[in-house]
Image: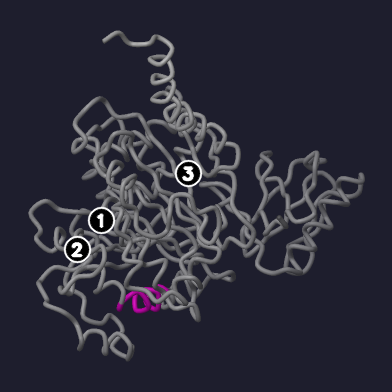
Amino acid sequence: MRTNPAWSILKLVAIAMPLIVANAGPALAQTDGRYIQASFVYNYARYYAPYAIQASAAYLPVDEFNARRATLDADGNGTDVNYAVQMVFPDEKVRPRAREAFKRWRYQFGSDAYLTCIDPSDTECLTAYNNRGWSFSGGPAFQVWARTRSAKADRGACSEVSIAFRGTVASSLGDWVSNADRFGSPYDDYYHQLRRNVDGIIKSIQNLDCYKQAAVKPQIVSTGHSLGGGLAQLAALASKSKGPRIAKVFAFDPSPVTGAHLVSQSLRDANAAGLTIDRVYQEGEVLSYVRSAAQQYPSTKSTCDPYVRTVKVDALPPGSPIQLHGMAGLSTQLVQLSYNGDTQLAYQAPPGGCKGIRYRAPVTDQDEVLVSSNSQRQTLLASVRKRQRGGSQLAGSGALGGPNNNSTAEFAIQGTAVASGKRTRALQRLHSREVFAQIGGVPAFEPLPRAQ
């Protein structure tokens, strides 16, 4: 039977149209930050690299980090960072760059054993533990890292605390049983153990010296790879809303299982409000196909509460879907993508968000300007506006610092000294809900919630 040419053309168009739409969609979404294409990832590689390193380091034994906690090498750098970099990155040429990306973080505590109740006074945890399902020896391995204000600081205030969860280890039965928990499980698997212990972990974070010393309480984020990415999302959805909540999740090649079925809808909704989730994955990795077919809550299409961002990376050499799923390779490529030749690219956080998001990206990965109160924000904003009108240079008073010397103004916010260049020019468009400053000649800002 002869085929009608026109009908053949229509069939080809019908087959091609979904592909055209699929390719056009991300390009449009790129404008609002919800979808970052592989060709744009280098802009944000420096931002994602530290969290990728944490997700890789989560595969290492907790005892090794406990032995190195709060210890420094001869150069004043953290031995915990040195160990993580040495073990995660086999290429000696990449290690200095990885160390540079990770140098401000310090290991605090962690676990890679079965979890009963981290907080023995948590009655809800004890009740859940007493009513647990069948138990086995394994538990959700995690490490807690804190971002310090100085590359060589072993103590003092921190600005951010991250909970990094380990992904699947092929030889671990507990890992595979937990991976299968999509709609419920008779076992006391990792999702169940974490669900009852999230508040205990966050309480332990609140008891950290660096957390208690901070004038502005550090924001808490979570990260992880594969199974760890699913656990990181559960941690954000299951914490009690009466305490500090996780502000953002960095999920790398994440499992489609998030454990959302273990959380009541009211608590899940309370934690989802203002939450940001970045799902970063290597093109062609095995779980990308699973997620496209069966993604547990929250949906990749969620535009707010939570705000879900998809970040695609296509930097690894060709390989099988299993090979492309490895976290060490993804970490290496994010570190490498943050350089152009031997020059480190500028730090930049992804754009976008929705009204009321809790997470605030650091101004820079080197030095921070943090404003501890609304009155300080207003004082700094008034100073910038005065400079914009041709008035005196930024000068602190009271909590904001010392006197003006006509050429260079120095002021301190939360004890961090910041020098403005002479006759610093305010940014061309001063948003009424942003506070601008000048750090070493580079404009910086601490964004406040925007009205949508």
Residue occupying the far front of the picture = 1
Of residue 207 and residue 127, the one placed in the foreground of this image is 127
Of labels 2 and 3, earlier in sequence is: 3
Q: Position of residue 157 (x, y in %)?
A: 50, 66
Instruction: State the residue position of label 1.
Output: 227
Q: How is the image coloured?
A: one colour
Q: Position of residue 158 (x, y in %)?
A: 48, 63
Q: In the image, what residue type sits under mark 2?
A: Ser
> Do the CB atoms of the residues marked 2 and 3 lie less than 8 Å apart?
no
**Label 3: few (<14), some (14–19) or many (≥20) C-alpha neighbours in 10 Å:** many
> Do the CB atoms of the residues marked 1 and 2 lie less than 8 Å apart?
yes
Q: In the image, what residue type sits under mark 1?
A: Leu
Residue 146: name its quadrant: bottom left
Alpha carbons under labels 1 and 3: distance apart = 22 Å
Q: Name the mark on residue 47.
A: 3
Please state which of the two labelled residues, at mark 1 or mark 3, is closer to the viewer.
Answer: 1
Q: Give the range drawn in magenta.
A: 196-205
Disc 2 on helix, strand or loop?
A: helix
Of labels 1 and 2, earlier in sequence is: 2
Report the quarter where the N terminus lies: top left
Indicate whether residue 18 is drawn in magenta: no
Disc 3 on helix, strand or loop?
A: helix
Label count reads: 3
**Label 2: few (<14), some (14–19) or many (≥20) C-alpha neighbours in 10 Å:** many
Whether residue 73 appears in this view of the structure is no
Of labels 1 and 3, earlier in sequence is: 3
Of residue 16 and residue 265, the one placed in the foreground of this image is 16
Q: Position of residue 436 (x, y in %)?
A: 73, 50
Q: In the image, what residue type sits under mark 3?
A: Tyr
Q: Name the mark on residue 178.
A: 2
